[in-house]
Image (cartoon, grey):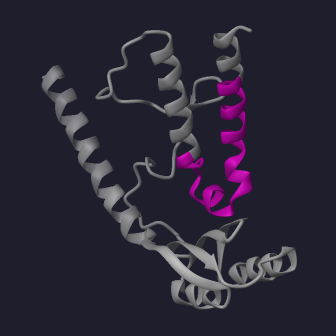
Amino acid sequence: EDVEEFARLVIEEAEAVLAKTPDMLPVLKQAGVVDSGGQGLIQVIKGCIEGLKGKVVDIDAAVTPSVSGNRAAKTATGTGSTQAADIRFGYCTEFIIMLDKEFNEKTETEFKAFLSSIGDSIVCVALDDIVKVHVHTNHPGQAFEKALEYGQLTKMKVDNMREEHNQKVVEQAEVQAAVASEAQKKNG
């Protein structure tokens, strides 16, 4: 009945789960970060709640991520590190299969096992006559080839995560330099 209390509990639970994400994905634990997508989702939810309360949110303001009780958390996109990411599977590969043949539970299990053999971060959702697929892999072509056994492909997308990481590191360094410059102007 109390929307604000409900929202507070949702955010509290989301932050508790976010704090556990390094234990859910070894690459996050190794990098010492939480899931950046999860952190972003929490920020979006917080912004929505503030908007519902009628508060004006300055979108240009810097946001310091926090997890459970105001302790700062590094995110995968905001670590401040200029070192190359240790990304095991370099390509985020997404596509939709428009099924030409049956895609039952057994077929889905076999397809997911194949994807697991070439990558990780697998999402495979079948709905009626389509299957939405997401996988991090070093061999996007192999994922496409296997998927073609089940039907035609559409909405094919491959992103080089190492390149994206490098770009984000450069952008973060530029932001840090700008913040340091502003602080120096104020102090000196």
Residue 158 vs 121, above or below: the answer is below
Whether residue 73 can be seen here: no
Q: How many numbered circles are shown? A: 0
Residue 130 vs residue 90, the one in the foreground: 130
> What range is drawn magenta here?
10-37
Q: Position of residue 110 (x, y in %)?
A: 80, 83
Q: Is residue 118 left or right of residue 139?
A: right
Q: Quadrant of the N terminus?
A: top right
Residue depicted at x 41% and y 54%: 81
Q: Position of residue 153 (x, y in %)?
A: 53, 80
Residue at the far right in the pictured view = 106
Residue depicted at x 66% and y 70%: 131
Quadrant housing residue 51: top left
Q: Magenta residues: mostly which secondary structure?
A: helix
Q: Is residue 171 left or right of residue 43?
A: left
Residue depicted at x 61% and y 57%: 28
Q: Is residue 33 magenta?
A: yes
Residue depicted at x 68% and y 34%: 14
Q: Is residue 13 left or right of residue 140?
A: right
Residue 144 vs 59, above or below: the answer is below
Q: Position of residue 85 (x, y in %)?
A: 47, 66
Quadrant housing residue 106: bottom right
Q: Quadrant of the C terminus?
A: top left
Residue 108 vs residue 55, the one in the foreground: 108
Q: Is residue 40 magenta?
A: no
Residue 178 vs 138, above or below: the answer is above
Whether residue 53 can be seen here: yes
Residue 148 vs residue 52, the one in the foreground: 148
